[in-house]
Amino acid sequence: MKDEIESLQKLINAFTYLPGVGRKTAERYAYSILNLSEDETNFFAESIVEAKQKIKFCSVCGNFTDNDVCEICLNRKSDIVCVVKEPKDVLAIEKAKNFNGLYHVLHGTINPMEGKGPNDIRIKELIERVRGGQIKEVIVATNPDVEGEVTASYIAQILKPLNIKVTRIAQGISMGSALQYADEVTLSKAIEDRKEM
Amino acid sequence: MKDEIESLQKLINAFTYLPGVGRKTAERYAYSILNLSEDETNFFAESIVEAKQKIKFCSVCGNFTDNDVCEICLNRKSDIVCVVKEPKDVLAIEKAKNFNGLYHVLHGTINPMEGKGPNDIRIKELIERVRGGQIKEVIVATNPDVEGEVTASYIAQILKPLNIKVTRIAQGISMGSALQYADEVTLSKAIEDRKEM
């Protein structure tokens, strides 16, 4: 049975490429494809090929774009640059809708365990942008995990001599969550960074 | 930003076709596609189109196949037929590896709420197969939910006059699970259907 329907097995294998998708979920997805109309499956297949072919990285900020320079770099005037790890972090911040500045995507974080140093991510490009003189503040919005913190410290250390403001996104209790479920590090950080009301 | 990268939005929309995949998961999947190699994305897209084009239903049992008659119907000799709701149930039973008989896929269950009667699923084809005279036992392996039970009763009622054995898969406590977590219906069914040791 397993070796029987080759094209189905091929499709199941393809779905295991997706993050967090094991054999069982891949099977479920593959079967669902068979229930789609031919138009829908063609649209699906086209979208995959087209996205891969068209989407490149913005030559300025490193975000995804289907042009040379992304819409944000092209249309926004700002002297604040928000530094993030990945293109999807840009989308997350854009969704929050309270930031109207520019971005800089690092495409990774410093991670000695994986042999990733400062030269393996887009820090050089960030320094060049800052040296260009248009930027007054760099907000470091890498994740609050070990690699993110190390990367943030490194960036702060290297940018401060260039005479600009370097800030870090605030850490604390998530909105809507309960104190009792917060981990200790987050809780102590929240107390440490308390604000006057 | 959201309207910006059209090909990315298209890909995200395509992923929401999958069962249980909302906007957020679709975004995650879409981004992961961009990290695949071009060979991998082509393989992915091809698999989708190919599966849809090649996979049909077996003219005998209704299971998926890329031929006219599926491998199981073609190669197995047996006088026992296991009736299931969907093609994926065949795969599930095949994985258990203790059944060596034939299958009959109903492609649905009787569901008056959705306006689905006995004529909307492959019961007529089952009766014809049984009338063919090669079948001694029909195991009804529809799901143990309301529709599955109704369908099972209907099949039993209609097949018994044809002088064959009609059986239903056993219900009870799942292997490896704890009594205390079993629901009451399952538990009472397990006690009712107890076996002598």
Image (cartoon, coloured by chain):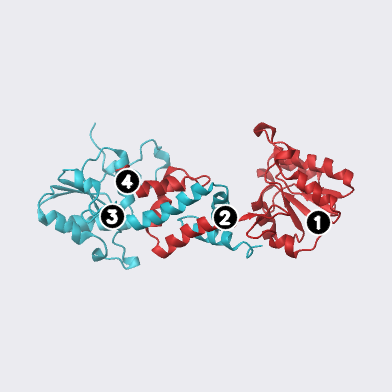
Chain colours: A cyan, B red
Please state which amino acid type lies under the numbered disc 3: Glu
- Contact, mark 3 vs mark 1 (Cβ under 8 Å): no
Q: Which residue is mark 3?
A: A149
What chain does badge 4 belong to? Answer: A
Q: Which mark is residue A27?
A: 2
Please state which amino acid type lies under the numbered disc 2: Glu
Instruction: Characterize the local packing of mark 1: few (<14), some (14-19) or many (20 or more) Cα atoms within 10 angstroms.
Output: some
Please state which amino acid type lies under the numbered disc 1: Ile
| Farthest bottom residue in view | A115
Looking at the picture, tell me which residue is in the foreground, A4 or A73: A4
What chain does badge 3 belong to? Answer: A
A7 displayed left or right of B83: left
Which image quarter is the C terminus of chain A in? top left
Query: Which callout, 3 or 4, points to the residue nearer the camera?
Result: 4
What chain does badge 1 belong to? Answer: B
The numbered mark, 4 or 2, whose residue comes first in the sequence reads 2
Q: Which residue is mark 4?
A: A91
Q: Which mark is residue B11?
A: none
Which image quarter is the N terminus of chain A in? bottom right
Q: Position of residue B94 (x, y in %)?
A: 69, 59
The quarter of the picture where residue B71 lies is bottom right
> Dot 4: what SS?
helix
